[in-house]
Image: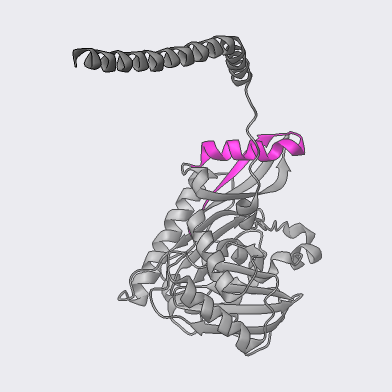
Amino acid sequence: MNVAINICGKNIKVVALQGRRVKKWASADLPPGMVNNGLILQPKVIGDAINRLFKSTGIPRDKVTVSAAGLTFTYRFLKLPRMKPTQVEEAVLRAARKEISLPLEDLYVSWQQLPDEGGELSFFVVGVPRNLIDTILETLKIAGIAPYLIGLRPLALARVAERRDAIIVNIEPCCFDIVFMSGGIPRVIHTISPRSENATLEDNIHRLANELTKTAAFYKSNNPEEQLDNNTPLLITGDMAEGTPAIALLQTEIDYRIQPLVAQVEKPEEMPMDSYATIIGLALKKTPSKTAKKHPSANFIDININILAGKYRKPKAKPVSRVSVLLWILLAAAVILLYPLYTAYAQVKAANTALEIGLNDIKRQINIATIINED
């Protein structure tokens, strides 16, 4: 059974899949102020809430995939020349260090190789701040869940949609996830936070529409050869997509054709699909793509990255340069040559100390003899 849990600022949700069939789902509300932009501020409170949720539902705790809403991340598409498999890790990290402005020491970096383009190797590389992942792991430990997989919500959204060309949007009170699919690959993944709780639905939809417009303009300027026009479907899901006027409001501000996101899974009729679509995408991390099997021309490529791979990667020892080796040889030679001198110096110093002690003793005896003579 594949289990996934999502941690949001307002609630936690869990879903259990048997293959592509939803078996169980549940949610629990959280007190306000528990999560801020993907950072869990109260691991004890959330960990206890997760523990209670698993106990009440009977969902197994082994092999749980987890994510947090609003998780900050940075990513790049890298192209590298062909090389031996043993050289890939070093080459990817070196290229990522040049392309990503943040220090890699502050990130957990993971990557996945994409289909080759021409004579080059193509990689999707993502980095997530370490403190965000560390607090998730602390929360899981309190909940009695062993770390298994940590995923990104936008990539889970692409996985559950399985579309070649589309714009996918998940709108929830805690964050908006945006994915631009082109050629079966999520070319742009983005997460923004809604306005404050005092903001109206119209304010948040207007913010989302502006973000979609800016993202589309940025994507077109950097990928003029890609097909992205008003005929591109805009797939909507999330808590705010069900039973609210959000979709109608968004349609008045954009030109894309809005469609509901249809997940390739079997579910009970009473299950609110929009509320659990992203979590289902997390639970599908270990399940083969259904669309790719039935429609090979769909060319959907699942970027199935485990953020924990960056945490548990063992750092390689840095190779010692020739200059360093030469310096150590010279230092050893100097020690060997100078050791006799040091020994002689130590012996002379010890002899001088003994003479000084003897001299002081003689002076003391002279002083005593002088005093006796005077008496």
- Residue sitting at x 63%, y 20%: 325
- Image coordinates of residue 313 in percent, x first then y, are 65, 49
Q: Quadrant of residue 338?
A: top right
Answer with left or right where residue 365 lies relative to residue 125.
left
The vertical placement of 24 against 356, above or below, is below
Compared with 242, 206 (above or below) is: above
The magenta span reads 72-100
Q: Quadrant of the C terminus?
A: top left
Q: Position of residue 66 (x, y in %)?
A: 60, 68
Q: Say which of 93 and 247 sits in front.
A: 93
The x and y percentages for residue 200 are 33, 76
**207 or 157, which is in the foreground?**
157
Front residue of 321 and 305: 321
Whether residue 260 can be seen here: no
Can the viewer see residue 176? Answer: yes
Question: Does residue 90 show up magenta in the picture?
Answer: yes
